[in-house]
Image (cartoon, grey):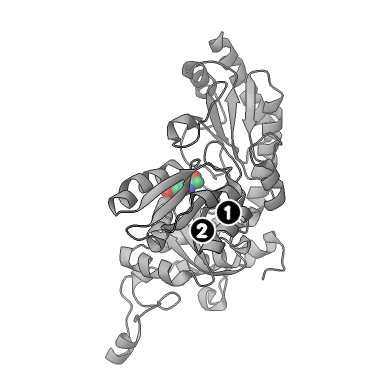
Amino acid sequence: MSDEKDATRVVQAGRRPEWTQGIVSPPVWRASTILYDSVAELRARGAADTHHKLFYGRRGTPTQWSLADALTELEPGAEATLLYPSGVAAVAAALLAVLEPGDELLLADSVYDPTRSLAGGLLKRFGIATTFYDPLIGAGIADLCTDRTKAIFLESPGSLTFEVQDIPAIVAVAKARGITTLLDNTWATPLLLPAIGMGVDYSILACTKYVVGHSDVMLGSVTAAQGQYDRLRATTYQLGQTASPDDAWLGARGLRTMAVRLDQHGRSALKIAEWLRTRPEVARVLHPALPDCPGHEAFVRDFRGASGLFSFVLRGGSDAARAALIDGLRHFGIGYSWGGFESLAIPVDPQRFRTVTRWEAEGPVVRLQIGLEDADDLIDDLEAGLARFAGARG
Ligand SMILES: *Cc1c(COP(=O)(O)O)cnc(C)c1O
């Protein structure tokens, strides 16, 4: 399928005749018990890999397999995908699949905060040590690798601050040392960054965001490169992780429009980012497609486009002045998550989540998720917000 363009692939992916039975979208197959014809058949099934075989509800039905296959097909070079009840569950399962007590993990300092909490909590408790690294370290990551380093976790661009990592350089260092690489690919999705094709071993998505696309389902996925699937499957089965067929079905419904949505999110977000950049109240815009974003050259080289999430740094002003900006917005909701059809604005304070890098700003930071509203309406809204900010800043 990899010769087709993205919009064609997201429409067709995962719609195998076995899963659809002639229906356009595979229906919701709900199950716990699966009935067998005989004791012999019951014994024969379920010995090992039951992905794609009806065995027991926890191992999925054609509804989940169809979405999982679709995500695999979007990552050329991938072996298989498993689904999880959230993005955080997907991150946790992938890390637990590749790490053992005594191992060391290298974690980007710009990583999503719950991933950081997992490293400092459960992983630490199980004897796995984490070393944080500068997301812009590139090939310099070799200096941090020891003979205990078993995994490098990347997230590009970084949560809140949007540094773009040099994925090929880090993958090359990892491959030379037999270290596993995992990438949180939620911002770009495989459409804007086919990570497995770049040599990453596990590509992780919070499907909650762009795959679902409608702010109404929690869902995660891990796509494994060739040869990396078996240990992910074993750990996932042991953890009892599964995504509900109803949620998977909503994820598959979202996926069919992901290419057009991403295109629109990306275009509007870039327009708004460029406009913000001209505003005197704004010190900096943190958007990977803008030349002043750290790692912009890697973005241009590796990504096929930008999605709809970015931040901007205000010039001076207090937390209260930032709240005056956000509280009065008409078209932006105030809430966590992103990737839905509606715009969101939240205050973010990246410096609180840094271990080895300092993150300094000229003022408070706002993160925007640009939805599918008209970009000019959003600009008018933000213009009024910046006026409130300037008034409150004095
Ligand atoms: C939201 C998010 C997650 C977690 O996904 P949930 O489905 O909310 O658990 C992981 N990584 C990134 C980058 C995210 O933005």
Mark yes or no: residue 53 visible: yes
Q: Mark 2 points at which residue?
A: 181
Residue drawn at (32%, 49%), measured in percent from left and top? 124
Q: Which of the 4 image quarters holds residue 241?
A: bottom left
Element on which disc 1 rests: helix
Crowding around mark 1 (Cα neighbors within 10 Å: few <14, some 14 to 19, many 20+) is many
Q: Please say whether residue 218 is visible from this viewpoint.
A: no
- The answer to whether residue 58 is left or right of residue 254 is left
Please give the label number shown on residue 264: none
Instruction: Name above or below for residue 320 compared with residue 265.
Output: above
Q: Quadrant of the N terminus?
A: bottom right
Foreground label between 1 and 2: 1
Hey, which residue is sitting farthest top in the picture?
A: 394
Image quadrant for the C terminus?
A: top right
Tell me where residue 9 appears, x and y as whole percent. Answer: 65, 64
Mark 2 secondary-structure assignment: strand
Badge number at residue 170: 1
Residue drawn at x 49%, y 21% as measured from the top left: 323
Q: Which amino acid does label 1 sit on?
A: Ile
Question: Going from the N terminus, do you reach mark 1 or mark 2 first?
Answer: 1
Q: In the figure, is residue 119 to the left or right of 376?
A: left
